[in-house]
Amino acid sequence: MPAIVPIPAFSDNYIWMLHNRQYAAVVDPGDAGQVLASLQKHQLELAAILCTHHHGDHVAGICKLAQVYNVPVYGPQHEDIPCVSRAVGEGDTVEIPEIGIELGVLDIPGHTIGHVAYLGDGNLFCGDTLFGCGCGRLFEGTAEQLFRSLQRLAGLPGETKVYCAHEYTEANIRFALACEPRNAQLERRRADSRALRAAGLPTLPSTIALEKATNPFLRCSMPEILHNVEQQLAIKLPAGSELAVFAALREWRNNFS
């Protein structure tokens, strides 16, 4: 399995680079300059580019990189992304022989209509759908689409490593504690995340197991979360509807500070 390292970009993005000390692939390269500098620093040759969705902070560097390196560019088939040469969707496989990996493609709409994830060797590259202790905003899809996408990811093996595209974990934990203040694992995650950031390290990757234990958007059946979202929004949600809880949580999160 190749090494997986973050390339920081902008204020809080991570461009994930997979490499075997000779060749590399990058996921969601919003900043070509950061990628080129990292490739030069580590004396790596770019072998492939992958993107999860069309937002500029994920794709703005693709065309420049494709000019410098004549490599395949994989992207979601239901989104219009310049310089994508190989459109992919549910059930497709991305093979990168230079670094010896195969990644399956999952359709996970909600944040955007055509959002995809890449999954292989126990590693999930999920863009802006699932975050550390949070989830993406609803820019194009519906709450039901995003809920179903997150439920699908939650069904992956617990040890699956989660490589999302932003360093949002600490802010998300503050919201999660407002939703579920009695969650002891969430308190431990806050301490761990603070220690990592104080040391200048990313809070990622997470794991599916950790997300299921601490991420309120994957815990919509918990009575404490139901009670607190109803109190916060002054609403009464339909009994037994995790989707309704999810939609209300997403609304609360949109205005939480």
Image: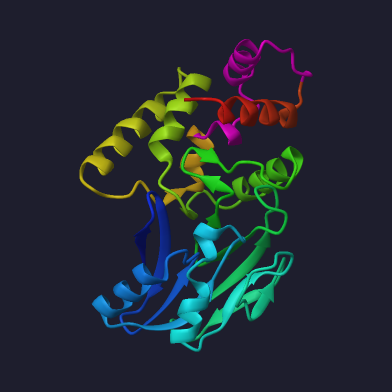
Quadrant location, the N terminus: bottom left
Where residue 232 appears, x then y in whole percent? 60, 14
Nearer to us in this view, 22 or 250: 250
Nearer to us in this view, 233 or 207: 233
Q: Is residue 236 magenta?
A: yes
Q: Which residues are magenta?
A: 215-239
Q: Image point 39% across, 49% down: which residue?
A: 12
Where residue 85 appears, x then y in whole percent? 63, 81
Residue 226 shows in the view: yes
Image quadrant of residue 78?
bottom right
Total labels drawn = 0
Residue 101 shows in the view: no
Q: Image point 30% across, 73% down: which residue?
A: 37
Vertical order, 209 against 247 (above or below): below
Where residue 240 appears, x then y in whole percent? 76, 23
Where residue 81 appears, x then y in whole percent? 64, 69
In this rendering, would 35 be left or right of 112?
left
Q: Image point 40% across, 69% down: which residue?
A: 17
- Name the colouring of the figure: rainbow
Q: Image point 37% across, 26% down: which residue?
A: 187
